Amino acid sequence: MLVGKLKNRAIIKRVIVFGLCVAFGWYLKGRLTPQAPMAGGMGAQTPYVLIKQVEKADVSPRQTYIASVEPIKSVNLKPQVTGYIEKVLFEEGSFVREGDILFVIEQERYIATVELRQAELESAKASLVRAERDYKRQKSLSRQNISSKATMDTSESTYLQAKAAVKQAEANLELAKIELGYTEIKAPISGQIGKALVTEGNYVASTLQTLARIVQVNPIRVAFSVTDKEMLTMRQAYGDNTLPLSTEIILPNGTVFTGKIRSHFADNEINAETATVAVYLEYDNAEQYLLPGNYVNIRIGTSEPKMAILVPQEALAQDEHGNYVVVVENNVAEQRRVVTGDLIGEKQVVLEGLTPEDKVIIQGLQKVRNGQTVKASLVKTEAEAE
């Protein structure tokens, strides 16, 4: 009997402890849970929300490609005559103009050759004068039947050979002058010249060595490839224009280059291995932000901007009737039904329902009813804050 009574007492104690715990829990819940304000009542609290100005921006579709920068013209300077380099007449890394003398190869030997060919020409001309006189004399004697036909033929042959010798001497002289001209290596194009690969005193052989390299930097060309499908879409969208004329080039340091496009064209065939078409754009590059050999990103868009309203995704809500946002004007919340478009980054395109002047709630949306007075703080973007 005593054992049974002890068990009953233990059970009763446990029930009492459990009941006290439950009662204490309900007490804490009542104290810690805030009371919901009465709708429109005297004790209702004005909700605090964060709002943001909607953004109006260009939402034209853009494609990004990896592109390479290449010169439209480039030249490797090579000697066309042999000899020692006498002079280097440019500053490495400078801009040179077409026709500037850059290198001078020893000229004495070539000047002497020109003088020799000039003397040979004079000798040939003197021989021609003598042969012509003899030919005319033999021709006159032949008419008088004084000179034999064999003598006449010999005289005529000598005269013709003398004429040919003069032409040969003139050609040899011209070649000697050309070679003398090659001793001055001139810039065939205007552009940026690099390092002098051969300096004074070095012996160079004809066409075997590169002396320096010139690249055209303004204008300059940016090249990239598009798929055959993308090229077809572009042609259908823009007619005869293979590309829209709105581009942004992201340079290696993140700077955006928006230079003027001088011209553009696509290659005349599709690469069968990659199923892509090479596209080339020519830019003004006076500041030389685009350097030959650079790899850049290029964004291609339409030439006509397509403006639309953008809102943060957190401003959007949804119910059984569709999407809506809550606009705040004069501290009064107003629910607006909206028609949404594409998602661009973290922002939603709104096609209908908002104006560029509207401010939408981005935090505290669940606490607000349509037509309710609110306390609102405007959140500014980094650009607006500056």
Image (tube, rainbow, N blue to C red):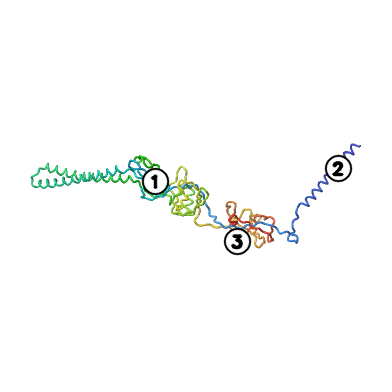
Residue annotated with mark 2: 13
List x then y, in percent, for residue 324.
Answer: 64, 57
SS at mark 3 in the image: loop
Residue at image position (83%, 44%) is: 17
The reply to whether discs 1 and 3 touch (Cβ–Cβ < 8 Å) is no
Q: Kindly report which numbered mark, 1 or 3, lies closer to the viewer in this rendering.
A: 1
Q: Which mark is residue 75?
A: 1
Q: Is residue 245 left or right of residue 175?
A: right
Q: Nearer the viewer, residue 153 or 130?
A: 130
Image quadrant containing the C terminus: bottom right
Q: CA distance from mark 3 to mark 2?
A: 68 Å
Label 1 SS: strand
Q: CA distance from mark 1 to mark 3?
A: 57 Å
The residue wearing badge 3 is 357
Residue at image coords 53%, 55%:
60
Three-letter code for the amino acid on which mark 2 is drawn: Lys
Q: Residue furthest right?
A: 1
Q: Position of residue 185 (x, y in %)?
A: 35, 46
Residue neighbourhood size for the residue with mark 2, other residues' Cα within 10 Å, grouped as few (<14), some (14–19), many (≥20):
few
